[in-house]
Image: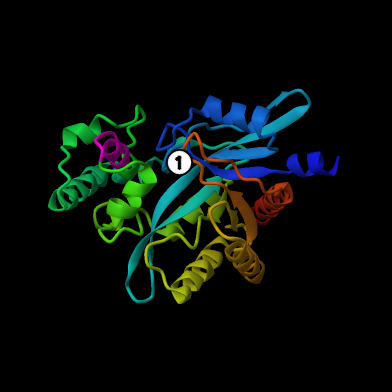
Amino acid sequence: MRTKQLLNERIDFHLHSCNSDGENSVKEIVDLALNREHLRAIALTDHNYFAISSKYIVGTNGNFLEVLPGCEFSTTFTFPSGKKEEIHVIGIFPKGVNEEAFADLFAPIDEGKQKYVEAILESLHNLGVNLSMEEVMAEKRSTGYIGRFHIASLMVKLGYGKTVEEIMDRYIGNYSPYYIPATNYIPYASLETVVERIQTQSGFPILAHPYSYHALTEKETITLISSFKETAGDTGGLEVYYLEYTKEQQESLRKLAKEYDLVPSVASDRHRKEQPFSSYGGYSFYKEMLVRLENRKREVK
């Protein structure tokens, strides 16, 4: 009974569908989360895209799943030193979302993305990997999304590596020696602008995977979390129970969330069909997010 209760408390607020760089459709993700994983709540958070715009609840065989609209926003954060980094913010919208309210933030991304892809292809060419823009664009999603995942997928097909993860680590990922910052080519809105826009639209902003950005020092990570808190105020969260982090990393983030009064969030950052969902029972965190959203609503009035 205790095990079933814990399973029913599980949430996962960082999931990608085939609308951006995931491999499962929205329907497949929901079916898996409900019928195989028995989660209590999930958020669909494609990159700079809303896969759904309204919350809904599905149920079968006594299990019920809340499905929330969300998005993983790419932002630019400028450190006091002047250094700029691409930082991701998860926005969840328990009462639904008006997609048009973010159109002006998303539009410049498409304009800069092709230049970014061209820069990556030039870097790969210098490494002896010759891909054409036409080949890469053939991998483009029906939603218009194109990114490093599609380049990596193409390279796997052409035999440059066995997995997308291997290609990312060796050639184009955040920890690759040939990493190219997207902010050099894509004019992402500032972190502050995105957080404030999410809140204006009754959403809850969450700082995503704080230990996963390119070459951030411990001091810079603390600066990022502190600045996020300053902008978000009482209505902000921190991805603490991130599936790829060690228990030690999660405990460190739990302490930081407590220190900065940010609501912990739970995330698998699931992209591939074989990847698991989060196994952490964090439904109480979601309830705390709802309380803080309601408090903010009263304060704004």
Counting from the top left corner in percent of width and height, residue 208 is at 51, 55
Amino acid, disc 1: Ala
Left or right, 125 with reference to 180: left
Outermost right residue? 1
Secondary element at tag 1: helix
Residue beneath the point at 55% across and 58% down: 245
Q: Position of residue 206 (x, y in %)?
A: 55, 54
Q: Position of residue 83 (x, y in %)?
A: 32, 70
Colour basis: rainbow
Task: Name the residue that disc number 1 marks.
Answer: 101
Q: Which residues are magenta?
A: 150-159
Is 286 included in the stretch rendered in magenta? no
**Label 1: how many Cα within 10 Å (few below 14, some 14–19, many 20+):** few
Name the chief secondary structure element in magenta: helix
Q: At 15% from the left edge and 42% from the top edge, which residue is drawn?
A: 130
Q: Quadrant of residue 276?
A: top right
